[in-house]
Amino acid sequence: MEDLLLTPLHEEHLKLKAKMIPFDGFDMPVQYTSIIEEHLAVRKNVGIFDVSHMGEIEVRGKDALAFTDYLVPNSISPMKDGDIKYTQLCYPDGGQVDDIFVYKVKDDFILLVVNASPNYSIKDFDWICKQKGSFSVDITNKSKEYGEVAVQGPLAEELLTPFVKGKVSLKDLKRFKFMYAELFGKKILISHTGYTGEDGFEIFPAAEDTAAIWNGILEKGQKFGIKPCGLGARDTTRFEVCYWLYANEIDETINPLQTGQGWTVKFDKGNFIGRDALLKIKENGISRKLVGLSVPKGGIPRNKMEVRKDGKKVGYITSGNYCPSLQKVYAIAIVDLPYTDNGTELDVVIRNKEVKAIVIDRPFLLPVNKR
């Protein structure tokens, strides 16, 4: 068995008798009771996730803001202290190194939250360092020093507000904003963000304080019906609202204009890595894009399964799942442009059998801020 890394909450997962699996080089909980039970707790009450496998990279120095603005396609320079933006790291050809969140602490301090370390944080860190050029910045991979827990669900704010002590009440912390605060006597960074489509927060304590934060939230959350949630519910919740997952919906071969991420690409902001290639793609038009698929019967499509039209391959599945909130099977696929109109009938090859699928709008369930 490969040597797996452990998050600061590993012992807590074992105490809770979680089912553990290898994930991105870590030993992680896939579920504690059942994926559906945990999923519905997030949709109806509140759930807590260990996401300490995510990576944190600090960019410091007088050019931190300008360097980050050059590094990504979204517009970073106008960000105010405490702002968060979703964006990508792109290769010069427009393909994606990763998708990330940019936290602006101040002009000379940017925190980048990247996908699960070590696979991505090391790759991302190496890529970022190679782009430094003449920018006056120090770039440090701090992933081992941070823990991270996500508290998600309609009762997340009510649960956390009495205990988070920051410059503003948690009720006044707007979406895609963060602040430094204290929780149960521990220093944290807390952001009004999440990956489930529900309201919620992501909490970054020091690695050594993560277990105290986790256990404190579980204890205070009992009256709210809180449940610890594993990777299974993390995937089903993000899938219902069609949030992108690196190595599924996005990778080095897929550019943001094909995936519905075009709103993050700001061509008018000046130069950034991948700009020329993405501008050319925009001018020429994309040849394929992500679509939603309804799969009425015949199985659950999975990543890389072939999508066909009249026996000819026209794309492939990026993600597919049973959606507990909707009690239906859906999929996301990247498909050649002529076959992407709503209502188009396609076939997915599941266990060597063509299964009917119908192109539909994404997301399957609207995120809470759009419902």
Image: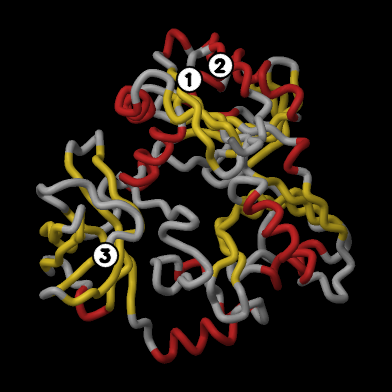
Give the SS element for disc 1: loop
Q: Earlier in the sequence, mark 2 or mark 3?
A: 2
Image height check: is 364 above or below 263?
above
In the image, which disc is placed on residue 14? Answer: 2
Give the SS element for disc 2: helix
Q: Name the residue located 66 percent from the left edge and 64 percent from the top edge.
A: 76
Left or right, 357 with reference to 21: left
Disc 3 and disc 1: Cα gap in Å? 33 Å
Report which residue position mark 1 lands on. Answer: 18
Q: Name the residue located 78 percent from the left edge and 70 percent from the top edge.
A: 130
Q: Picture coordinates of residue 90 (x, y %)? A: 59, 71
Q: Are marks 1 and 2 in contact (CB under 8 Å)?
A: yes
Q: Picture coordinates of residue 309 (x, y %)? A: 15, 73
Amino acid identity at mark 2: Leu
Report which residue position mark 3 lands on. Answer: 306
Disc 2 and disc 3: Cα gap in Å? 38 Å
Left or right, 46 with reference to 67: left
What quarter of the picture does the N terminus occupy?
Answer: top right
The quarter of the picture where residue 30 lies is: top left
Q: Are there few (<14), some (14-19), or many (20+) residues within 10 Å of tag 2?
A: few
Q: Name the residue located 71 percent from the left edge and 29 percent from the top edge.
A: 205
Q: Nearer the viewer, residue 174 or 115?
A: 115
